[in-house]
């Protein structure tokens, strides 16, 4: 199908999982291998260096950017609860507005009781590219971390300091013997769908990939593509844990990795960087398919991640549900508009949120969302730097007594479960307390129930090492951020249904 400038634009939502904002070449990282993203920023897109997710873990974040709501609006703060039937959802709104919506792979944006076919025109299920059974089964009931249940890479459950590390290392070209995620199947199917699309109906491709989500495992040529010596230093654990969220201290003490050498940490980080490089390559394949089909100019492309990853910072891996370090909440967001939208390709430092993605899609596609949400179109920012947001917000955790917010299935696995060091803390208050971040360009304030708040001067302390919540010199800043947070809650605490 060729170009048709008279119809609404096509949309590609290329969503990766757990990609930190700083692991991209055009963000100044000398070890990152992301030539596709880097080239798009030079020619056809804007990449936002200060984009933030609204929750630091997968399902709540996806519920947020699919609705344009902050997670407190309907209580989407738990990993087990996707969007309920009847709640607004971007893909469903697009389908009802005349788009052919093609959804591939993972479906944890919606509750497990829901039928994915109610949200899209066509669904492509997760499967291995060779028709084999995937080794990592994505489900709400748990994960298998190896082929046929083998987890030899973890070592002895009683003594191994790699047991909870998520570190696998190099795998072969089929993802064996340890890991296969299905991303190649999703990307190849999307390319085939682009090549064979022959309708005048505009389409939306939703591609929720798994990489670079741990376990840290990748094949050649990406495994060897990362210059280990160029990888930036990781953040060390604090010398004093008393002003640090207790959940971090609990995970740190239980994951048994405090004795890792810097060489081992660097190798783990190199594998993660290589996983990001593989995702960048896969985006390039999708872009190439759009160009060959004559659809590229008329397609809006969004490449972003649901949250980040510690990747060794503070001796931690993966993510956590109620802390908001930039390595977790600051995410890649690259936007290529369709023809007709004024664009100045560049890296923008404007403060933006992932809930701005659905607002932008709706703006360009002429879609009335049918519900009040809080996203703001990024269209003006693509043309020039201008005021957009004075603060961004992220939240998570639970109230005491909210036992249904606990990942009970992972807890039931016991100490043999990969997530045990973190999920065992879900049973404890204050470890898993509810918290919310208010971040401006210069400061970050985190209000925490049941334990000490956090306050960071990001100008002098960009790595959030020195919690100044009790510093009298910061009292004026603290008062301003508390007032800003109160206004945020007043503006977003509820929505009135439209009749």
Image (spheres, rainbow, N blue to C red):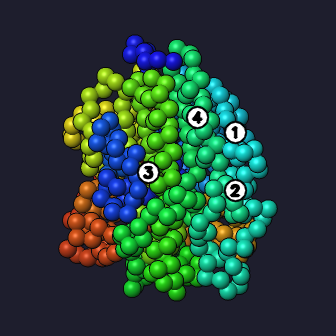
- Of the numbered discs 4 and 1, the one sitting upstream in the chain is 1
Instruction: Specify the label residue 53 is tagged with.
Output: 3
Quadrant of the rendered structure where residue 327 is?
bottom left
- Residue at horizontal 51%, vertical 45%? 282
Q: Position of residue 370 (x, y in %)?
A: 49, 25
Mark 2 or mark 1: whose residue is earlier in sequence: 1
Question: In terms of depth relative to the viewer, which is nearer, 299 or 118?
Answer: 299
* Secondary structure of the residue carrying numbered label 2: loop
- Element class at badge 4: helix
Q: Which residue is mark 2?
A: 136
Dot 4 crowding, Cα within 10 Å, few <14, some 14–19, many 20+ = many
For discs 4 and 3, the disc positioned in front in the rendered view: 4
Residue at image mark 1: 125
- Classify mark 2: residues with Cα within 10 Å, few (<14), some (14-19) or many (20+): many
Q: Which one is closest to the eye, mark 1 or mark 3?
A: 1
Q: Earlier in the sequence, mark 3 or mark 2?
A: 3
Asked whether the residues under the numbered discs 1 and 3 touch, taking CB atoms below 8 Å apart as contact, a structural biologist would say: no
Disc nearer the start of the sequence (4/3): 3
> Residue 367: percent from the left, percent from the top?
45, 23
Count how many numbered circles sit on residues in the image: 4
- The alpha-carbon separation of the residues under discs 3 and 2 comes to 25 Å
| Numbered disc 3: secondary structure | loop
- The Cα atoms of the two marked residues, 4 and 3, are separated by 25 Å
Q: Which mark is residue 190?
A: 4
Vertical comparison of 52 with 200: above or below: below
Measured along the vertical axis of the image, is residue 118 above or below residue 461? Answer: above
Point out residue 422 in the picture as x, y percentages from the top left corner: 59, 70
């Amino acid at each position: 199908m060729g170009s048709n400038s008279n119809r609404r634009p096509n949309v590609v939502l290329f969503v990766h999982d757990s990609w930190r904002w700083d692991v991209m070449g055009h963000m100044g990282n000398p070890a990152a291998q992301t030539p596709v993203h880097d080239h798009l920023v030079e020619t056809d897109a804007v990449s936002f260096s200060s984009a933030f997710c609204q929750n630091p873990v997968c399902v709540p974040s996806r519920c947020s950017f699919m609705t344009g709501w902050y997670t407190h609006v309907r209580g989407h703060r738990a990993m087990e609860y996707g969007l309920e039937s009847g709640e607004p959802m971007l893909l469903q709104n697009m389908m009802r507005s005349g788009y052919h919506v093609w959804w591939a792979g993972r479906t944890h944006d919606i509750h497990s009781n829901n039928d994915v076919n109610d949200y899209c025109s066509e669904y492509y299920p997760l499967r291995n590219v060779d028709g084999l059974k995937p080794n990592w089964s994505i489900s709400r009931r748990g994960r298998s971390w190896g082929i046929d249940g083998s987890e030899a890479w973890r070592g002895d459950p009683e003594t191994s300091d790699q047991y909870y590390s998520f570190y696998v290392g190099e795998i072969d070209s089929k993802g064996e013997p340890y890991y296969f995620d299905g991303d190649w199947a999703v990307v190849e199917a999307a390319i085939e769908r682009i090549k064979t699309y022959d309708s005048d109906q505009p389409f939306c491709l939703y591609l929720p990939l798994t990489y670079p989500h741990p376990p840290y495992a990748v094949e050649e040529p990406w495994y060897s593509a990362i210059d280990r010596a160029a990888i930036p230093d990781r953040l060390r654990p604090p010398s004093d844990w008393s002003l640090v969220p207790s959940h971090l201290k609990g995970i740190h003490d239980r994951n048994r990795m405090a004795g890792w050498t810097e060489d081992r940490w660097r190798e783990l980080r190199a594998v993660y960087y290589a996983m990001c490089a593989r995702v960048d390559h896969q985006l390039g394949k999708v872009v190439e398919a759009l160009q060959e089909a004559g659809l590229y100019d008329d397609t809006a492309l969004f490449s972003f991640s649901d949250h980040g990853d510690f990747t060794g910072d503070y001796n931690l891996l993966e993510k956590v549900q109620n802390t908001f370090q930039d390595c977790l909440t600051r995410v890649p967001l690259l936007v290529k508009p369709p023809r007709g939208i004024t664009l100045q390709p560049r890296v923008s430092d404007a403060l933006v949120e992932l809930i701005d993605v659905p607002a932008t899609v709706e703006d360009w596609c002429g879609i009335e969302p049918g519900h009040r949400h809080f996203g703001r179109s990024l269209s003006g920012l693509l043309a020039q730097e201008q005021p957009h947001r004075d603060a961004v917000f992220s939240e998570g955790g639970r109230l005491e007594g909210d036992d249904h917010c606990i990942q009970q299935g992972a807890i039931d696995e016991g100490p043999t479960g990969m997530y045990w060091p973190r999920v065992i803390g879900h049973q404890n208050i204050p470890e898993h307390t509810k918290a919310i971040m208010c971040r401006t360009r210069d400061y970050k304030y985190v209000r925490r129930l049941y334990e000490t708040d956090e306050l960071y001067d990001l100008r002098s302390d960009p790595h959030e090492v020195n919690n100044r919540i009790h510093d009298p010199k910061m009292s004026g800043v603290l008062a301003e951020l508390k007032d800003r947070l109160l206004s945020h809650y007043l503006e977003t605490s509820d929505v009135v249904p439209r009749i």
